[in-house]
Image (cartoon, rainbow, N blue to C red):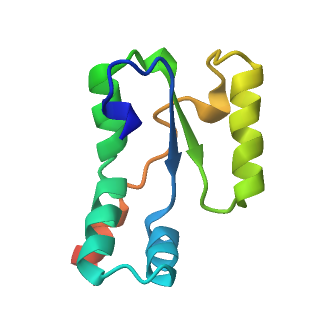
Amino acid sequence: MAHLLSTMQKIIILRCHPSQLIKRLAQKRWNVKKIRENVEAEILDVILCEAVERHPQKNIFEIDTTHRSSQQVAASILEITKKKFRPTKPYSIGQIDWSEEILKEYSE
């Protein structure tokens, strides 16, 4: 929800490939409807779009958590903060794109 607050100065969005997100949420015993809603939001970049509407792009960062442990994600966050939130290619927005995943549902 932090991305919706105009008082936030920097935004770090954690992303996850939809197939892995399904597994993670199922493991947490989320119901099928809620999993689907979250996966669709991830595919459509909902959080990123909402963040971009409220914040300068230079203040938004994305981390792909798909194949990373929580310790690795924390290390990435530390890397961003140690660089004083200067734009860095690995965490710049627009590099993560799951949009083709939506087509898989219609091709099956």
Tell me which corner region of the image, top left, top right, bottom left or bottom right, holds residue 98.
bottom left
Q: Quadrant of the N terminus?
A: top left
How many numbered marks are there? 0
Whether residue 20 appears in this view of the structure is yes
Tell me which corner region of the image, top left, top right, bottom left or bottom right, holds residue 104.
bottom left
Q: Position of residue 69 (x, y in %)?
A: 72, 61
**Relative height, residue 82 to residue 26 (above, below):** above
Q: Position of residue 35 (x, y in %)?
A: 33, 73
Q: Is residue 24 left or right of residue 37?
A: right
Q: Is residue 91 left or right of residue 50?
A: right
Q: Name the residue: 29% across, 21% down.
A: 54
Q: Is residue 19 left or right of residue 83?
A: left
Of 20 and 33, the residue lying toward us? 33
Q: Name the residue: 50% across, 51% down.
A: 15
Of 31 and 7, the residue lying toward us? 7
Q: Position of residue 46 (x, y in %)?
A: 29, 45
Q: Quadrant of the C terminus?
A: bottom left
Tell me which corner region of the image, top left, top right, bottom left or bottom right, holds residue 41.
bottom left
Q: Position of residue 91 (x, y in %)?
A: 61, 33
Whether residue 99 appears in this view of the structure is no
**Relative height, residue 81 to residue 17 (above, below):** above
Q: Name the residue: 28% across, 67% down.
A: 103
Q: Name the residue: 52% across, 71% down.
A: 20
**Relative height, residue 39 to residue 82 (above, below):** below
